[in-house]
Image (cartoon, grey):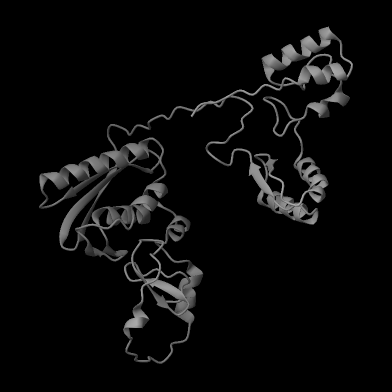
Amino acid sequence: GGWMKIVNNTVPLALKKLGYSEKEINDIVKHLEETQNIETAPHLKEEHLPIFDTSVPAPGGKRSISLDGHIKMVAAVQPFLSGAISKTFNMPNSAKIEDVYNAFLQAWKLGIKCFAIYRDGSKATQALYTQKRSFKKLEKRKLPLTRVSETHKFSIGGHEGYLTYSFFDDGSLGEIFIKMSKQGSTLAGLLDSFAIAVSVALQYGVPLKELVEKFIYNRFEPSGITNNSQIPIATSIVDYIFKYLAFRFLSDEDLIELGLKKPEAELQAKITQPQLPLEIKVNSKNDQLSGPPCKFCGGMTTRTGSCYTCLECGESTGGCS
């Protein structure tokens, strides 16, 4: 997309109404056109600055209409309208969760029927900017000519393979190589190309966690039981490789967030809960009705009490399996 510069042509009219001379108006407007900021303009009196406040600060400026000002203006008009008011309530980039909560609470107390906020910079692209954005060019991080590497042997459903991964000087992952035994030229070429693409992504700064989230639970052959106790079952080569890299490089917090590890509290609860006598029950066909797709791997789920448990990866929506 492109961009469009919107100029406020009412500034000279407002200055004239405030009693400024033609020369003073020309000086102020010239300064505004050159700097995009009226706060530091010559001749402009400080008591007149609030008249020219905008929703977001000008480049290099500090002034703007406060969130409180937006809310109270809409609240003043709301009683005279039967419907809601279409209005975006701008919040600065420094706004915290508590600020957003308090803003919604204040809007509700003042009787505003519709309240939609926008926190500056909260999206990669947004409609309003006060200056042209500059984007930093991505730089490729280079590995040393002689680098530290590890090779991991794995087996998926009887198909053996080797994963070699190299490190940057700080110990983070820099590149990967994948080699399968008894493979055809097509599979070898695809795995080589895939490994190159992943390596380039890592060297340009793509977080490993993002790659893991995208590639785990991809399903295609070969798949099945592995020789790794941390990853007993893999749905594909890609699934195994990224689960292994996750366990090798990511923190426990990331593993829990990705669904690859359960929180300690949940594990402790399972260990300490009393063992109930085993009840033998023959399930009818209706008991195995499928639920929604698993949010972790996309597999089929079945109802277990008030939750759904995945038949593929074993994850549960509420930990009640």
Looking at the picture, tell me which residue is in the foreground, 217 or 201.
217
Q: Nearer the viewer, residue 189 or 122?
A: 122
Above or below 147: residue 309: below
Q: Is residue 95 above or below residue 224?
A: above
* x 87%, y 14%: residue: 20
Give the total of numbered labels.
Answer: 0
Q: Front-most of 5 and 44?
A: 5
Examine the rendering and report whether any part of residue 212 can be seen.
yes
Say which quarter of the image contains residue 217: bottom left
Quadrant position of the C terminus in the picture: bottom left
Where is 79 relative to 69, above or below? below
In the figure, residue 159 lies in which quadrant? Answer: bottom left
The location of residue 318, given as percent across then percent down, is 48, 71
What is the x, y in percent for residue 298?
A: 35, 61
In the rendered image, residue 127, in percent from the top left (x then y), is placed at 58, 34
Q: Residue at x 26, y 43 (%)?
A: 195
Is residue 168 at least partly visible in the picture? no
- Relative to 315, 12 lies left or right: right
Closer-to-camera residue (112/24): 112
The percent position of residue 107, horizontal first and vertical second, equals 76, 52
Q: Examine the image and state in which quarter residue 157 appears.
A: bottom left
Residue lying at the far front of the rendered structure = 82
